[in-house]
Image: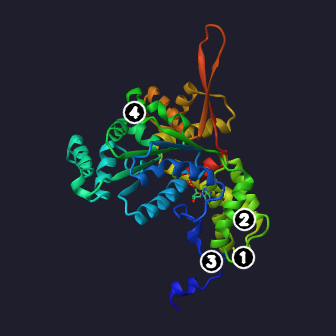
Amino acid sequence: MNIFEELGEKNTVFKCKKFLDHRFLPDKLPHREEQIRSVAKYWIEALNSVTPPDITIYGKTGTGKTAVAKFTKKQLLQMAKDKNLNVRVEYVRCTDYTTEYQVIAHLCQQMGQNVPYRGWTKAEVIQSFRNLFKKNVFGKDLILIILLDEIDILLKNDGDGLLYTLTRTENVAIASISNYVDFKKFIKPRVKSSLRDREIVFPPYNAQQLVDILEERAALSFRDNVLNDDVIPLCAALAAKEEGDARYALDLLRTSGELADEKCSDIVFEDYVREAKDHIEHNKVTDIIMTLPSQQQKVLESLLYLTKRKEEITSGRLYEVYKEVSKGDSVSYRRIFDFINELEMLGLISTKTISRGRGRGRTNIIDLQCEISLLEDAMWSA
Ligand SMILES: Nc1ncnc2c1ncn2[C@@H]1O[C@H](COP(=O)(O)OP(=O)(O)O)[C@@H](O)[C@H]1O
Ligand SMILES: [Mg+2]
């Protein structure tokens, strides 16, 4: 028997797993009606051949920002097509295109202009982009809405030049999406004043809302009656604790189902959800650690050593141990501070500054922010 045929016959709790994938865009987005309406109220201008205002969408990870933007895009394009209007909505993920040049080159390519991803000057690329709006290319006025998802990454990486260019291109409306409320600190006043955007905030989902979201998706993806009654509520409750992250809730549900399959169980039990939680956390830490440069891994190793000995960890003490661990192949004391900062940003450690009292200065105390066993496992696999 063919191995794929054999595996295909295996029992599974899933009917169609793709509906649990992050990239799947559902037909309904429960508890986001208000946000969809807000976006649509601005974008409707495009259907009157007027450039819509710029908008900014904020909210924590997994609050449905990308899903709402894509959903509203789909609906707008349907209407524009019916009315035979030249409206376009281009989605750009700023983790894939991280500079002004790349974004604009990408937009040109999406719209049929052959602009190379390197080699031209920025001015040439911008000119090529602006040419798209000349009447003779499309025959009639083009209105272009540009969705800049995860815009904070681009701003941090390349400054606000892209926003400067786009706000100065007629017939372009920007929709920025950010996980951070304070991302505007990367935008200089000259750009801020021309952006004049409207803000839409996405609150975290609560447990009940997550239950509704999961139920819709579960009906599509799981076979009938395979989920124990408490599975969805537990996934929702755990995700509600993680700042109302729907992506995490979906991950929990999918992983629980995969565990049922692995165990050849016809039912997804509540215990599998808890197991799924450990699994996901473990993978997250492992992923982070595997991609750390080796010097940083040595810093973590030193932190682990000191934590297990229950020592108070100052940067000085950490450096001593780090030098031992790296055996001569070590970086300078100054560089260690950069490493500490980066590890803190990744959420693996926290630091606090304490004062040792008069004349004795201030000291940084470092604390591990993940479980020792989790870190140990992850370091082993890295
Ligand atoms: N209201 C909702 N209804 C159904 N699915 C949702 C809803 N909100 C989020 N999701 C799903 O949760 C996942 C994360 O949502 P996403 O839009 O990527 O969040 P964000 O962009 O805010 O980080 C996606 O798979 C998305 O389809
Ligand atoms: Mg998103």
Number of on-image labels: 4
Mark 2 / mark 3, whichever is N-terminal: 3
Q: Sequence order check: which comes first, mark 4 or mark 3?
A: 3
**Where does residue 86 sit, x and y in percent of width and height?**
35, 58
The residue at which mark 3 appears reads as: 15
- Spatial CA span between label 4 and label 2: 52 Å
Q: Nearer the viewer, mark 2 or mark 3?
A: 3
Task: Mark 1 or mark 2: name the one nearer the start of the chain.
Answer: 1
Q: Nearer the viewer, mark 1 or mark 4?
A: 4
Q: Quadrant of residue 8?
A: bottom right
| Amino acid, disc 3 | Lys
Give the labeled residue for mark 4: 194
Residue at the spot 65% in from the left edge and 37% down from the top edge: 307
Q: In the picture shown, does residue 27 fall above or below 249? A: below
Q: Is residue 81 visible?
A: yes
Left/right of residue 90 with respect to residue 282 in the rendered view? left
Crowd rating for badge 1 (residues with CA inside 10 Å; few <14, some 14–19, many 20+): some
